[in-house]
Image (cartoon, rainbow, N blue to C red):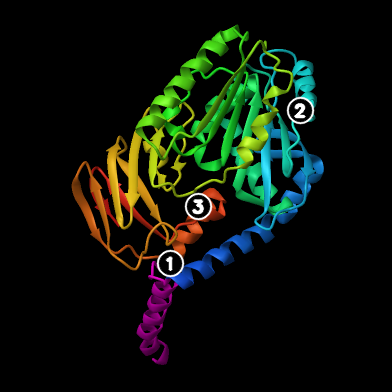
Amino acid sequence: MFLFKAAPFYLFYLLVSVTFAQPSNKSITAKQAVNETEKVISDYKEKHLPTSKADWEKGKIQIGSDSLLFTVKIFGEKPSDGRSMFISMHGGGSGPASMNDQQYKNQQRLYKPAEGVYFVPRSPSNTWNMWHQEPVDGLLERAILEAVIMEGVNPNKVYIMGYSAGGDGVYQLAPRMADHWAAAAMMAGHPGDAAILNLRNLPFFLAVGEKDAAYNRNALLTEWSNRLDSLQSTDKGGFVHDVHLMAGMPHWMKQQDTISVAWMAKFKRNPYPQKVNWIQDDVVRKHFYWLSVPQSSAVKGHTVFASYQGQEIDIQRNDNDTLYIHLNDKMMNLDKQITIRQNGKVLFKGKVTRSKELIQKSYADRRDADYIFSGEVVLVNGKVRM
């Protein structure tokens, strides 16, 4: 009899316990968001430290069946705001492994920054497109994360550079992963179908020998120089570039291109540019600066043009069924109303709440301290979903 009477109370207790055990999207303050951000970063670094140490000792990163051999050299004293990182990609291409091994060794002594972590990876493959196949993106992202943990690299001071086939890689990876780099330097490569508009917020250095006519490299350099000049003339805040057609030089420029290192080092990444051009490459990405899309919406050629100023966000073009707009207090004041327009139409006007869950998710997605967001707005087929 006693058990029968107690059963309803016990069921009620279970219901309450389960209800309160569910994840909560409870709004938090700006200060709480800062504290949660610091905790998330600290916890992950502590958790990943053993893996980073092992990778650094082996000189090898492994993600599933994909791997990346690398060497590291440290130059200069560590600045107060963290070290720089120069990812330097070798030439070579389609041919025997021994050829690319030799190019890998040559790249290790090719450049010497005044300060920074000089990171030279060995291409995961021996193919013409060795540096812009899909696995490279994740391997380089992992390299950056581990350099932050092991060497105190500032993620806003990461630079990408490459020579010959490595230059081909820069033409592709610079715009595709523009949100990762502080600046990029392309030497003696050719662009293929690279998306030049994505370079809006990425300072870009280019150098090719005047006599380097193979694959039309010299003529394509001039074409890109003209296109970047034109883009910068109509967008004064973007498309910073420095182009050099090295007089009298063939494919090998006798290290005249080493001026690229000091040029890049002048810049730091802005993770939250006020204007973003995002055109999907053949290797699609889910994230780009403060925007993202689900995997189903990541389609080659899909384009987003978006900007913000003060508390207002303007979407000029969006080819995606679903678009995430990620926000934090470094971009705008989340305690005040935000207005979102698409093609001139107001889609949203109100406050965006901060949540611990979004902070945790954004870091889990990107492992980058400057791409941690506490708020978001989702656009689905032209309508807002919170």
- Graded by Cα atoms within 10 Å as few (under 14), some (14 to 19) or many (20 or more), the crowding at tag 1 reads few
- The residue that disc 2 covers is 110
- Graded by Cα atoms within 10 Å as few (under 14), some (14 to 19) or many (20 or more), the crowding at tag 3 reads many
Name the image quarter holding the N terminus.
bottom left
Q: CA distance from mark 1 to mark 3?
A: 22 Å
Q: CA distance from mark 2 to mark 3?
A: 32 Å
Identify the residue at horizontal 58%, vertical 33% (top origin): 184
Identify the residue at horizontal 80%, vertical 29% (top origin): 109
Q: Is residue 24 magenta?
A: yes
Asked if 198 appears above or below 130 in the picture, the reply is below
* Residue ranking furthest to the front: 247
**Considering only order in the chain, which callout, 2 or 1, is on the residue closer to the N terminus?**
1
- The answer, for residue 132, to whether it is visible in the render is no
Where residue 74 appears, as percent x and y from the top left, is: 78, 44
Identify the residue at horizontal 45%, vertical 43% (top origin): 287
Is label 3 in a helix, a strand or a loop?
helix
Identify the residue at horizontal 62%, vertical 43% (top origin): 158
- The residue that disc 1 covers is 23
Asked if 165 appears above or below 76 in the picture, the reply is above
**Considering only order in the chain, which callout, 3 or 1, is on the residue closer to the N terminus?**
1
User: Which stretch did the figure color magenta?
Assistant: 1-29
Instruction: In this rendered view, identify the residue nearer to me: 349 or 366.
Output: 349
Instruction: In this rendered view, identify the residue nearer to me: 108 or 298.
Output: 108
Where residue 132 appears, as percent x and y from the top left, is: 57, 26
Q: Which mark is residue 371?
A: 3
